[in-house]
């Protein structure tokens, strides 16, 4: 299930389940969106991106969906594995600067 | 492999000390680098954009005299936290823009700064 912690929402899933992480972005002028994975004590790692002229993009085990009408982005991870446990951030950009969302912690139990 | 190297990965020092953090782009030139700050369980907040050969552009609320940025070469940007105090303790992350990459920025692995 999903819960809201002090600062970071947490999504707990079982290994093998599909995970869906959501993000609401703020700037309707943003035209490029990225999902990052951050493991403890490390910098963000690029997962997948999508431009505003698309509403869906698929990668290996990951899919990003973009709904510009409600300014919503989601990341779907298929067959979630323990190694997917991390904090996931969406980021938006219109020019050069990246603006990060609040993040979601994904916990995968075996 | 890593394309951006950050050093040191961790530093602990006394209040009042100035601390320098290095961010290097490996095997590519970066005219633009970025410095972020991240508090525990929170998101990354952009502090400043580092431009090679010119002054850094600071975000609103970030003290430029407190956080000195130098981007003297195309592969190195440094962030110096001057006269650091406990409230400056945080995770500092740099990134670099690589022109031939499909990614907007490549991130270093961060520096954990602890001020006693």
Image: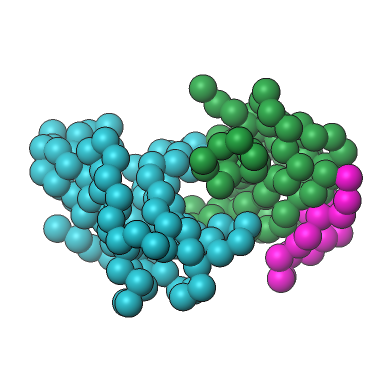
Chain colours: A cyan, B green
Q: Nearer the viewer, residue A105 or A32?
A: A32
B11 lies above or below A55: above
The percent position of residue A27, horizontal first and vertical second, equals 49, 74
The percent position of residue B69, horizontal first and vertical second, equals 81, 48
Left-right relation of A20 to B107: left
A89 lies above or below B12: below
Left-right relation of B113 to A26: right
Residue A88 is a magenta residue: no
Q: Which residues are magenta?
A: B53-68
Q: Nearer the viewer, residue B83 or B101?
A: B101
Residue at screen point 34% across, 42% down? A86
Residue at screen point 64% across, 39% down? B99
Left-right relation of B50 to A95: right
Residue at screen point 49% across, 37% down? A42
Q: Is residue A6 visible?
A: no
What is the chief secondary structure element of the magenta stretch?
loop
Q: Is residue A78 visible?
A: yes
């Amino acid at each position: 299930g999903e819960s809201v912690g002090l600062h970071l929402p947490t999504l707990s899933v079982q290994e093998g389940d599909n995970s869906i992480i959501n993000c609401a972005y703020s700037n309707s002028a943003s035209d490029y969106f990225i999902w990052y994975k951050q493991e403890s004590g490390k910098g963000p790692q690029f997962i997948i991106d999508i431009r505003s002229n698309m509403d869906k993009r698929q990668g290996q085990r990951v899919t990003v969906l973009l709904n510009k009408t409600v300014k919503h982005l989601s990341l779907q991870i298929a067959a979630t594995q323990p190694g997917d446990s991390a904090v996931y951030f969406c980021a938006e950009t219109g020019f050069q600067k990246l603006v990060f969302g609040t993040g979601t912690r994904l916990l995968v139990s075996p | 492999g890593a394309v951006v190297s950050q050093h040191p990965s961790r530093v602990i020092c006394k209040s009042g000390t100035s601390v320098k953090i290095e961010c290097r782009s490996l095997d590519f030139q970066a005219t633009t680098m970025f410095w972020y700050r991240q508090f525990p369980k929170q998101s990354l907040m952009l502090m400043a954009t580092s431009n090679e050969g010119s002054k850094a552009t600071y975000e609103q609320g970030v003290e430029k005299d407190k956080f000195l940025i130098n981007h003297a070469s195309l592969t190195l940007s440094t962030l110096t936290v001057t006269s650091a105090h406990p409230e400056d303790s945080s995770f500092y992350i740099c990134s670099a823009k690589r022109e031939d990459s499909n990614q907007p920025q490549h991130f270093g692995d961060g520096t954990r700064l602890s001020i006693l």
